[in-house]
Image (cartoon, rainbow, N blue to C red):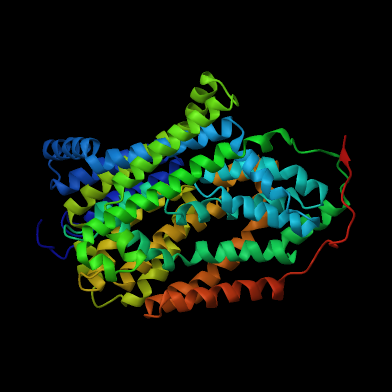
Amino acid sequence: MYEFSGSFLSLDGGLTLAAPIVAIFLALLSKRVIPSLMVAALVGALVAADADPMAGVTMLISQVGSNLVDADNLTISAFSLLVAATVGVMGRAGGTRALVSKVERFAKGRRGAMIASWLAGAIVFFDDYANCLIVGSSMGPLCDRFRVSRAKLAYIVDATAAPVASLAIVSTWVGYEVGLLQDVLPAGDISPFSVFLAALPYRFYCLFTIAFVGTIAITGRDFGPMAEAEREAAKTMVNTEKHEEAHGTYASLAVVPIGILVGLTFVLLYTAGVAELGEKAATSRMFEIIGAANPYPPMLYGSIAAFTAATLAALGSKAIKFDGVLQGIKGGTRPVFEALAVLYLAWILGDLIKEAGTGEYLAASLSGTFDPWMLPVATFALASLTAFSVGSSFFTMGALIPLVFPLALAAEGGVVGPIVLASCAAVLDGAVLGDHASPISDTTILSALGSNVDVVTHVRTQLPYVAVVGVIAILCGSIPAGLGYSPWLLIPIGIATAIATVHLLGRVPVAENAPPIAAAN
C-alpha cells in the first residue's frame, strides 16, 4: 500500500473510509443490506486499485472468487445451513415445541409463566429465529391464562433470542461471528475461535440483558410502558385453548439432535485442542484447549451428525414423512441463505478494506488523539446506532469488525489484549442492542409476530428496558473494561446493578394471586 499523504480527500487518506461509509449510508437510506454491500464492495475495489476501473473490477472479481472457494468459508456455510436444516426438521416434527412445553410444567402462577418463557428462550439457544417463533407461539396461551401481557412475552422472547444465540458457541450465529474474526486476524498462530471465546466475558450487553429479563420474570416487577401493558392485560378476560399435549411425546426429537450437536462438537473441539497443544494440554485450562483447536471441522462434523439424527428420529418416530423433512429443511434454511449472502459480501468488503489500508489510516490518524480506553465504549455506541438504523445485526458486525479490529490492534501495539477483545465484543454487543431495539429488525418483527402483538407496541414497551441495560453495559462494562478492569470483576457488578435497577424502578403491576383465566374445553 501507499504511504499516507495526510490529505483527507486522497485515495491513500480519508477516501480509504469510503467503502464502509457507503455501505452504512446506503443501508440507512434504502433499508436493503445486500445491494448496499455490493455497491460498497465496488467502491472499495476502486479505492484499493487507486481509482483504476479495470484494475478495480479485476480485484473485485479476484476477491469474489477467492472467498467463494475458500475452504473455511465453505465449512462455515455448510455448518450454518446444516444447523438451520436441523432446526427446521426438529420444528416440523414438533420436537422443539414439545421441548418448550416441558418447561411449561414448572409454571405456577403469573411469575411462573414468565419464568417458564425465560427458560424456554434459554433452551432454544441455537437459533434466534426459532426462538422468536417457537417460544412466542408456544407460551402465548400460558401467558394469557395467567394474565401476562403479550407485550411482556414479546420482550422476554426478544431478550432471549439474539442475546442467547450470539453467545452460544454452537448456534447459527457462531459461524458468522468467527468467520468475521478470521478475516481480520493477522496471519499467525492466533485462532479466530480462541478470540471469540476470549471475548465472551466482554459481551456485557448480552450477559446483562439475560440477567435483567430473568429478574423481571422472577420478581414480576415492571416500569414504564410495560407496567401499563401488564395492568391492561389484567383487565382483559380472554378464554384460551389448552396447549396441545400430544407434542410432549416427541420432545426427544429435539433433545437428541441438540445433545449430539453440542456434545459431539465439544468432544471434537477438545480432542483437536489436545492434539494441537501436545504436552502443554496437560497443564492447560479447558478454555485454552478448546481455543487452540481449529473449530471448523468439529463444528461441521457435529452439525452433520445432528442433522442426521434429527432426520432419522423424525422419520423413525413417524412424526413426519420424507416430504415433511424436505419442507423442514426448506423452511429452516431459507433465512440462512440471505445471512450467508451478507456474510460473503462482508468477507469481500473486509478484504477490500484491508487492501485499501483503511485500518492503517485510522490508526495513523487517531494516534495520539484518541485514548485507547475510549475505543470499546465508542465502538459499542456506533454499533448500536448502526444496527438500530439499519435493522440488521449481521450487517453491522460485517461492516464494523474490519474497521474496529485493526484500530484496536494498533492501540495495543499489535497484541490481542483487553482493548482488542473489549472492542470486538462491543461491535457484536452493539449490533445485538441496535437489532433488539429497532422496529425494522427481523428479530423484533418475528418476536412480535410469534407473540401475537403489533410491532409498535412491542418496540414501545421494550425500548426503555433495552436503553437501561445499554447504559448499565456502558457504565459497568465498556468503560471500566477499557480502563483495564477484569471482565470477571465487572460481570457480577453489572448483573447486581441490573437486579438492583429492576427493584429500584419496578413495581408489581398485577397481583400474583390474581385468579387465572379459565381455559376453554
- The percent position of residue 329, horizontal first and vertical second, equals 48, 28
Say above or below: 245 vs 421: above
Position in image of residue 259 (x %, y %): 49, 46
- The percent position of residue 14, horizontal first and vertical second, equals 23, 59
The residue positioned 22% from the left and 69% from the top of the image is 410
Whether residue 223 appears in this view of the structure is no
Residue drawn 18% across and 48% down? 47
Q: Quadrant of the N terminus?
A: bottom left
Task: Depth check: give the residue in front, 20 or 434.
Answer: 434
Q: Quadrant of residue 440?
A: top right
* Residue closer to the observer: 263 or 363: 263
The reply, left or right, for residue 341 in relation to residue 128 is left
Is 11 drawn above or below residue 40 in the view shown?
below
Q: Residue furthest left?
A: 2
The answer, for residue 93, to whether it is visible in the render is yes
Query: If the image is split into quadrants, where does the C terminus sit?
Result: top right
User: Which quadrant holds residue 274?
Assistant: bottom left
Residue drawn at x 40%, y 52% as measured from the top left: 396
Residue at horizontal 24 percent and vertical 64 percent from the top: 362
Residue 318 placed where, x, y %?
Answer: 59, 24
Is 384 placed left or right of 210 in the picture? Answer: left
* Side of 264 where 39 appears, left or right: left
Between 512 and 340, the one nearer to me in the picture? 512
Residue 347 against residue 488 in the figure, above or below: above
Exactly how many numbered labels are in the figure?
A: 0
